[in-house]
Structure formats: C-alpha cells, structure tokens
Amino acid sequence: MGYGFLKPARVVVSLIFFLLITFAFIDFTNTLSGKFIQAILYLQFVPSFIYFLELAGIATAGFFIILLLTLLFGRIYCSSICPLGTLQDIIIWTSGKIRRRKRFKKQKDFRWLKYSILIGVAGFLIFGYITPLLLLDPYSNYGRMAANLFRPVYLLINNFGAYGLEAVDVYTLYRVEPGVTHWMSVSFSLFIFLVVFILSIRFGRLFCNTLCPVGTLLGVVSRFSWFRISLDKSMCTSCGACSNVCKAGCIDVKSREVDFTRCVACFNCLSSCPSNGVLYSFKREKEPEVKIKFDADRRSLLAGSLVAAASLATLPLSAQQRRHRRKGGGPRQIDREFPVSPPGSASHEEFITACTACHLCVSACPSHVIKPSLLEYGLEGFMQPRMDYMASYCNFDCIICAEVCPTGALTPLTVEEKHVLQLGKVKFVKQNCIVHTEGTDCGACSEHCPTKAVYMVPYKKRFSFPRLILIFVWVAVPVNMPVRQILNQSMLRVILFILKQKSL
C-alpha cells in the first residue's frame, strides 16, 4: 500500500487550521462569527481541556477526540491541528529553502526534563493554578504571537494599502488604529517566538518534544497507538534517508528503531525511503517498556520548586500594583483591589483559573478596552485580559469577547444579558471631577451612560465679586453696540451664567 498521499493530506489540513486560526487573531473586521471561531478552536487541546474542567459536556470534549486520534494514528494534533506546530514546520521549510539542503539527525531524548515539566504543570493544575500551563500551552503561545506580533504587521500593511488607494480615490480599505497592548505581553511573545524560531532551525521539533506539556502527554498516549511508523528490517538498508528528514529526530537507523513517542506524524520519512523500508501499519512488534527513573535529589528539587511557585502565586497584590493614576495626573489616586475582568466571567476566581491568556478576546475587542494584564491579578493571572477603562470603553451592545473565548473563562452572553450585566463597581471620586477641580459644567458621564445609572445633582459654588466684574467686562467689551444695548445684553449674560453655576 502506498503512503504518498499522507504527507500532502497532512500539509493541506495543517494549513487550513493554521490560516483560519491566524485570521481569527489578526482580523479587525470581525468577518468570522463567534460560532465559527469556536468550531475552529474546538480541537485545540488545552482550551478544550480547561473548558471541560469547568463544564463537562460534548461541547467541551474536543480534547477527547484528540486523545482518540492519538490512540489510533499517533500525534496527529502536533502535525496537523496545533498552530504552533505548523508555524515550526513553516520555519523549517523556509530555512530548508534558504539553506538549499537541511539534514536532521537522531536527537537525544530529554526524558527527565520533559516529564518534570509535565508533572509540574499537572501538579499546579491540581492545586488550581493555571499559570505554568498558560506559559507553555502551544495554542495560547501562538495566540499571543498572532495578537502581539503578527496582527500589528497585518494592520500596518492594511494601513499602507489604504493610504495608497486613497491617493487614487479608492476607499475599499480603511485605516485602523492598532490599539496599544502591554509591553510585557509583547516582550514575552517575542521571546517565545525567538525560542521557537531558533530551536526549529537547529533542532526541528525539539520544542514539541521537550518543552511542550501537550506534546509530552500525547507522546505518552502514542505509546499505545494502533497505527505507527516502523522500519521493516528486511527492507531497510540503514541508508539514513528517513533520519535526514525526520524533524523529531526519533529514527535510529543503526538499530532500525523508531521512538514513536517523539514522532509528530509529519510522514516525511514515508516518501523519502528509496527501498520502501518505512512502514505505517497496524501490526508491529511489541516494544520494551521504557521506565523513567527519578533520583531522590531530582524529586526533592521538583517538589521544592512546586512549593515555591505555589507560594509565589498566592502573593497578594502590593499597594503600588493596585493603584492607577488618572490620565494626565490627578489630585487623588484611585485604589483598585481587583482589576475588572471582561464580560462573561462568572467571578474573579473562576476567571483566572480558566483563562489561558491566548489573547483572542484582546484581538477581537472592537474598542480595544481589553488589555493584557501584568500583575494586576497577581502572579497566578499573568498576562490574562482585563478591562482598561483608561484606554477605552466597553460597547453596550458588544458580546464578541464572550463569543470567541475557547476555554469557557468567558461564558457566552446575549445582548439583553449584557445590558443588565454589572462588570464592576463604579466609585465616584469628586476630587478628580472637572466640575470640582476646574469650576466648569460637564455632565458627559450622565449623557453617555446607556442605562441612566448616572444622573446629575445640584452642585453649588460661590463666586467672588471681582470674578463677577471680570465676567461682566469679558462679555461686554467685545460687543460693538450702543452703550444701552451693551449693558442690557451683558447683564443678561451674567445673570444666565450665575444661574447656570448655581444649578450645578
């Protein structure tokens, strides 16, 4: 049976997932509906698993399908569905084209490191801390790259195109403000991208087989896969052609063995063998069980790291972190005990234990009021989204963020439910209001409040006699009229101005 169709089919499927997920993050026109985005992200392992922990059901069982596919065919998720895996394949393919010829070789399996990461992440999840998984989840890391690195480039290209078309009176494209994100989120995304980029060029899929907890878990499951790649010892000539194209570095041509736990099911080896010695079949020889040994020092080091990290995650916010100044400086500081989470979050605690900080809601928000946090939630909520009302405002009829969330951290809302949803408690600081600080009338908050929860009350302010004289001179002198008419109109203006001030 020929295997030539497997690699092209895998490439097509991976590109479809990759392009759709990328477009969901960089699109600023909300072309894709929330339900369509949810369907695209249904098979993303970590978001589906987190959602299942919050609400068990068929709608949250995408990770079960991934586990089933892995039991049948191996790590299909790593090769075809994971966007970070496809990004690594694109980097490897581009590097091979530039360098003309790219050869891989058998790599060392860092068992202690990858299983320590997996056990550590699982231990944190048991105690309710999602931060380690947030930092290592392949989908969330790619989402942050797309939102913080790829999206600004996409918007820049769009704005240049709009500027060029405007010169010839074509307005198909329009300019878009990128929206300012947090520098820490951009820096972390750039750091992960550079790590993935360097490892991909030099070592292929080493990131997936060492640092990614999802890849490690699926590698354990793939040990029991029904279909797997193996070398036919009667046909294999140990030429090394299959090992040269193996991005996972899991083929040992000397012993003619394949470490299928590290195989990412790219199927490059199937079409590279000149003697048809690489098989992808159901029947296979029973492999010896690989035992993972941990010495006492390593176990104590891992346990100590877990305890230390758990204690750091529970540190309360300092007063300096909780304080936010009014833009332009203000006469009084505003103390906030907690940040405001996006609409659809049931509670502060449930939100930070379910959000993986993929930043899809940050990209989808049309008013750019949702921003990545730094330490506003504490260490356990690093880079999770928050509402930054100093930057913008939340649209009264907008429910996009709740529609696109793949983990259930934001539950879907109807527009009617959003209208009566309280996102946070408002605290009026009179010392920062311009009616008090500048002695002028305003009322903008009452005019813009869609629920009319804000209303104006009389505010009295005394005016000195010299000020009244200055007001009289100011309104009287510029008028080029007879003296009697000047006095009449000026006095009328002064009276109306005083009445207006008293009404405040």
Image: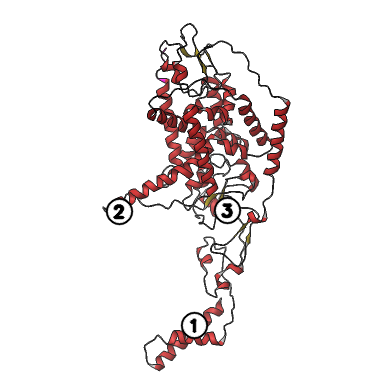
The percent position of residue 89, horizontal first and vertical second, equals 45, 29
Could you tell me if residue 402 is visible in this image?
no
Hey, what amino acid is under mark 3?
Leu
In the figure, 207 relative to 233: above or below?
below
Could you tell me if residue 485 is visible in this image?
yes
269 displayed left or right of 501: left
Q: Quick check: marks 3 and 1 in contact, CB under 8 Å?
A: no
Within the image, what quadrant is residue 121 found in?
A: top right
Q: Which residue is mark 2?
A: 166
Q: Which residue is mark 3?
A: 421
Within the image, what quadrant is residue 124 found in?
A: top right
Q: Say which mark, if any, is on residue 496.
A: 1
In the figure, 119 relative to 225: above or below?
below
Q: Secondary structure at mark 3?
A: loop
Whole-angstrom CA distance, mark 1 to mark 2, is 48 Å
Dot 1, crowdedness within 10 Å: few (<14), some or many (≥20)? few
The answer to which of marks 3 and 1 sits earlier in the sequence is 3
Q: Residue at x 40, y 47 (%)?
A: 155
Give the main secondary structure, helix, strand or loop, of the magenta stretch: loop
Q: Residue at x 48, y 46 (%)?
A: 363
Hey, what amino acid is under mark 2?
Glu
The percent position of residue 271, horizontal first and vertical second, equals 41, 17
- Residue at the far front: name it: 99
The answer to which of marks 2 and 3 sits earlier in the sequence is 2
Q: Nearer the observer, disc 3 or disc 1?
A: 1
The percent position of residue 161, horizontal first and vertical second, equals 33, 48
Q: Secondary structure at mark 1?
A: helix
Task: In this rendered view, identify the residue nearer to me: 258 or 176.
Answer: 258
Q: Residue at x 57, y 69 (%)?
A: 433
Task: In this rendered view, identify the residue nearer to me: 310 or 239.
Answer: 239
Q: Which residues are magenta?
A: 1-5
